[in-house]
Amino acid sequence: MTFLSGGTGTPKLLAGADAVFAPQETTVVANTGDDIELGGHLVCPDVDTVLFLEGDLLDRDSWWGIEGDTAATHERLQVLAEAAGLDSGPRYLPDDKQTAGREIARWRRFSAVAEFMHIGDDDRAIHLTRTGLLDEGHTLTDATATLAAALGADRTVLPMSDDPVASLVHTPDGIQHFQEWWVAHDGDPPVEDVEFRGATEAEPTDAVLDALGEPVVIGPSNPVTSIGPMVAMDRFRAALESTPVVAVSPFVEDRVFSGPAAKLMAATGRDPSTAGTAEAYPFADAFVLDSDDGTELDRPVVRTDTAMETDDDAERVARAVERALSEVRSV
C-alpha cells in the first residue's frame, strides 16, 4: 500500500492506520514542493512530518516539528537581527544564488537572518544531517532512508523526487514561495496562480514508481500544494492512471477541514469543494467522503465521519479507505 502525503491531512490518517494497513508493508511518498533551503540547510516539511510521526516525535498539537523541542538557535537569530538592524521576514538570496549550489534547492533559497520559519533545535539537527548527506553526494532519497532508520521508522518514507520542484504562489505583490506565503504571511496575500517550477523536468525516482505500482491512498491533503507538485510530474501522474487509487476528500461538500486548500483551489480554477477535488483527481477510482457530504460523484463512494481528532478517528477513516479499495478491486 502506498500513501501520498503532504501537509497534515495524510499524516493524521497514517497515525491511526496501523491496525488496517501493516506499517512494514506501507510506503509513504511525501511532497517536496514545499521544501526550502534556509540558512544553507534543506528543510523538508512534509517529509519530516512523516519521519517524526514514525519516530513518535511529532508535535501532535501543531502537526509540525518535534514535541517539546527547544528553539534557542531560532530565538538567538531573531535577537541578532534586531540588534543589527536587519529587516526581519523572509529574505530571499539574490537571483543568481537561486540556481547556484545544491540543485535540489533551486528557486527556494532563503537567508538565515531573522529566520522566518520556527525551527527547533532538535529539528535543526535533522536538517543539518540531511544537508550534510546531500553534500557528501547522497541523494535526497538516500538521506531520507538514513534518517528514517535513525528514527526507527517502520514505514518506508520516500521523497517524491530527487529533482527540484518548487511550489511558487503568484500574488499581486510578486511570486512567493509557498512557505513565505503560508508561514510568513499567513496565507493572506491574494492568489493569482500556483506554479510548480521544475516539475516538467523532474522525474519520480525508480523507488517511487515501484511504490506507485501498488494501490495508492491519497489522504485529505491539499490537492493543490500537497498533491499538485507530485501529479505535475508526467510519469508520476501516468503511474496513478494505471493503479487503483482511493482519495479521501479534504472537504465536506464546500467546507474545508483546515488549511488553505479552498483559497488555492479557487485561484487555480477548481471549485473549492469535494466536487472540485474529484475533478482535480481524474485518476482516482473511488472516494471516501464524510457522512454529511452529499456530493454525487461518478465513482464509487464510501462515507464515514472523516474528522480525525484522535487515532481512533483515523482508524475509522482507514477502514473506510479499505472498503473503498475493496470496491475498486472487485470491479
Image (cartoon, rainbow, N blue to C red):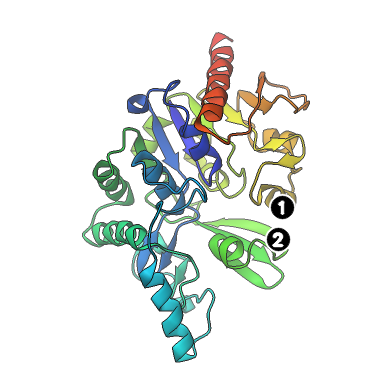
What residue occupies the far top of the structure in this picture? 330
Mark toward the start of the polypeptide (1 vs 2):
2
Q: State whether residue 298 is above or below residue 128.
A: above
Quarter the N terminus occupies: top left
Q: Position of residue 85 (x, y in %)?
A: 49, 90
Q: Secondary structure at mark 2?
A: loop
Quarter the C terminus occupies: top right
Labelled pair 1, 2 in contact (Cβ < 8 Å)? yes
Residue under circle 1?
A: 263
268 vs 10, left or right, is right
Q: Nearer the viewer, residue 259 or 104?
A: 259
Q: Position of residue 155 (x, y in %)?
A: 35, 33
What residue occupies the far left of the structure in this picture? 136
Q: Residue at x 43, y 21 (%)?
A: 19
Which amino acid, by three-letter code, is at mark 2? Val
303 vs 49, left or right, is right
**Number of residues whose C-alpha sits closer than 10 Å to that of mark 2, classed few (under 14), some (14–19) or many (20 or more):** many
Q: State whether residue 239 is above or below residue 61.
A: above
| Quarter where residue 222 is shown | top right
Q: Position of residue 275 (x, y in %)?
A: 74, 34
Q: Residue at x 71, y 24 (%)?
A: 291
Please indicate, yes or no, whether residue 50 appears anywhere in the rendered image.
Answer: yes
Q: Position of residue 37 (x, y in %)?
A: 41, 65
| Quarter where residue 123 is shown | bottom left
Q: Secondary structure at mark 1?
A: helix
How many numbered tags mark residues here? 2
Q: Residue at x 48, y 55 (%)?
A: 165
Please indicate, yes or no, whether residue 39 appears anywhere in the rendered image.
Answer: no
Q: State whether residue 162 is above or below residue 154.
A: below
Q: Residue at x 66, y 52 (%)?
A: 260
Q: Nearer the viewer, residue 57 or 254?
A: 57
Residue under circle 2?
A: 191
